[in-house]
Image: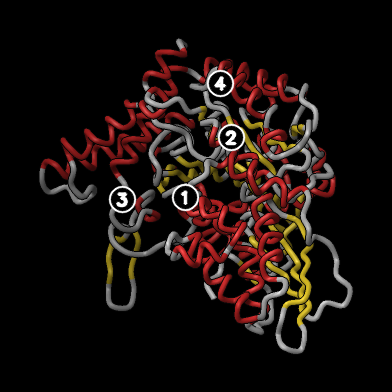
Amino acid sequence: MNISTVRDDFPIIKNNNVVYFDNAATAQRPVQVLKAVEDFYITTNANPLRGLYAWSVGATDAYENARSRVARFINAADDAEVIFVRNTTEAINLAAYSYGMEKVNAGDEIVISVMEHHSNILPWQMVAKARGAVLKYIEPETDGTITADMIKEAVTDKCAILALGQVSNVLGAANPVKEAAHIAHEHGAMILVDGAQGLPHVKTDVRDMDCDFYAFSGHKLPGPMGIGVLYGKRALLEDMQPFMRGGEMIEYVKRDSATYAELPHKFEAGTVNAADAVGLAAAIDYIDAIGYEAMEAQENAVTAKILDGMRKLPHVHVYGPEDPKRHHGIVTFNIDGCHPHDIASVLDEENIAIRAGHHCAQPLMEYMQEKCAMEFRAAARASVAFYNTEEEAERFVSAVSKVRKWLGFGD
Amino acid sequence: MVLEIKDLYREIVNEHNLYPAHKGEMEKPDMILEGVNPSCGDDIYLQLKLDENGMVTDGMFNGSGCAISQASTDMMLDLIIGKDKDEALKLAEGFMSMVRSTATSEQIEALDEAAALESIAHMPARVKCATLGWKTMQKMLNGEGGKACTEKEE
């Protein structure tokens, strides 16, 4: 991978002198993705799946080809196992409403971790409350490590659903999801893996992992905003009720009843987001052409540079694993006496974009405040993508070293 | 005058954040109210003493938050101690208008040192930080109970 050619593919990166280190929130998109979306609208835009004239047939083909592309990318057995949704949040809600609300019974347990993003907590809180189930939390080690033994301890025969992130959006640590799937299945439980922070960094094979559901967003990949995927095993999806009801998801509708379309359309009510599905397929083509190995090498080099630099700075506390390779580009940190929002504001003036706050992971922030003696219930986070450079890492570390001075401290 | 963020910190915010004049716990306050900023985690307790004529005779705050929320609250207390309730509420109204870029020059002038936070209007992500103390004071002096929250419209 030639980093300068890659950077040239990203107009917003190429045209600005900004260190964009908020990739875990959303990635930037290469021209190839932007072009694919534009081409769809310029050459074949029509409402897909109705197909009575050429453009609509073209739109349907483009949309269904995008689905096949996703299926091949994550190695789904069948294109119909790929449901297009808006984002990871919608994907998990679909599973929670259509599976959880129907199949979880009183006294069952739903197991998640303290490290989950709110979108993998709140839907399960809802299911647990509505169905009289118990929501159980796995507590990671302070660096974000969850071991297979911790999962074994939490998952019993009472477990109906195990829902785990593939990679933590705060600590960067990956969970042993393949072992988790095995453990869940031994106890007759279903496993959902939240791949929002995983798929952008880790080559993922849903069949090898043997998860029942896998959720991810296009915009972190780097595909368009507004398109995401819920992968589900066919037998499970077939046995589930629709999530939303309306156009394009039916077979027959009568005044008092309806029958629903086959998979995957049963779960895709209303006009679909075909253009962004096409953009997502283009994003997959793009990262496939570069290859995960090359992306990881670049991300790890930049992450290592950030961690090395920050660990030498007084007053700076970096969270997550010791090994840069285990961070998946995510470096969460605090600086003594400095609120994360103040850190992000002064770095913004240096043209460095980072995230600060609770990272939609308030239970984890509370846990870290207690276990890692965090001063505020919040942290700053730099997150790296494959188009970031070691020079940017140096610029970032140098700016971080000045934050305390900018915020009025004498050292 | 619009200040860049680092200048804003250097010229006014850092001083009030690191060496606040009114931070701490007050003995026997007449009024106490919590103010929160959920998206930031800012959480303050505002405590005021009022005399029989409704004049603010003393005020303190404690809790934790970002430099802007802390400094803004400290400056607010500088300003309202010695003022009566109606004047304090009028100043709060002026401050709220200032961070929405709709204040008159008289309103801004009345805010004295707190007028330095005018630049916050250009930093939408930080407006809630700056208004936390003011909103808490408004809610308190208007005699509303509960908790002041910058993310709920009153």
Residue A9 picture quarter: top left
Residue type at numbered disc 1 = His
Say whether disc 4 or disc 2 marks the residue closer to the N-terminus: 2
- Side of B78 where B29 appears, left or right: right
**Residue A180 versus residue A335: which sits nearer the camera?**
A335
> What subunit carries mark 1?
B
Residue B32: x and y in percent read 77, 75
Distance of label 1 from label 2 (alpha carbons): 16 Å
Mark 4 touches mark 3? (CB < 8 Å):
no
Distance of label 3 from label 2 (alpha carbons): 39 Å
Residue type at numbered disc 2 = Leu
> What subunit carries mark 3?
A
Label 1: which residue? B122
Label 4: which residue? A392
Q: Is residue A240 above or below residue A63?
A: below
Label 2: which residue? A347
- Side of B95 where A124 appears, left or right: right
Image point 32% across, 64% down: which residue?
A246
Q: Quadrant of the C terminus of chain B?
A: bottom right
Label 3: which residue? A272
Please tell me whether mark 3 sits on a helix, a strand or a loop.
Answer: loop
Distance of label 3 from label 1 (alpha carbons): 37 Å
Q: Are marks 3 and 2 on the same chain?
A: yes
**Residue B150 versus residue A155: which sits nearer the camera?**
B150
The mark lying in front, picked from 3 and 1, is: 1
Q: Residue furthest top?
A: A2
The mark lying in front, picked from 4 and 1, is: 1
Label 4 environment density (alpha carbons within 10 Å; few <14, some 14–19, many ≥20): many
Camera sees residue A296: yes
Image point 78% across, 30% down: which residue?
A411
- Side of B29 where B1 appears, left or right: left
How many marks the image carries: the answer is 4
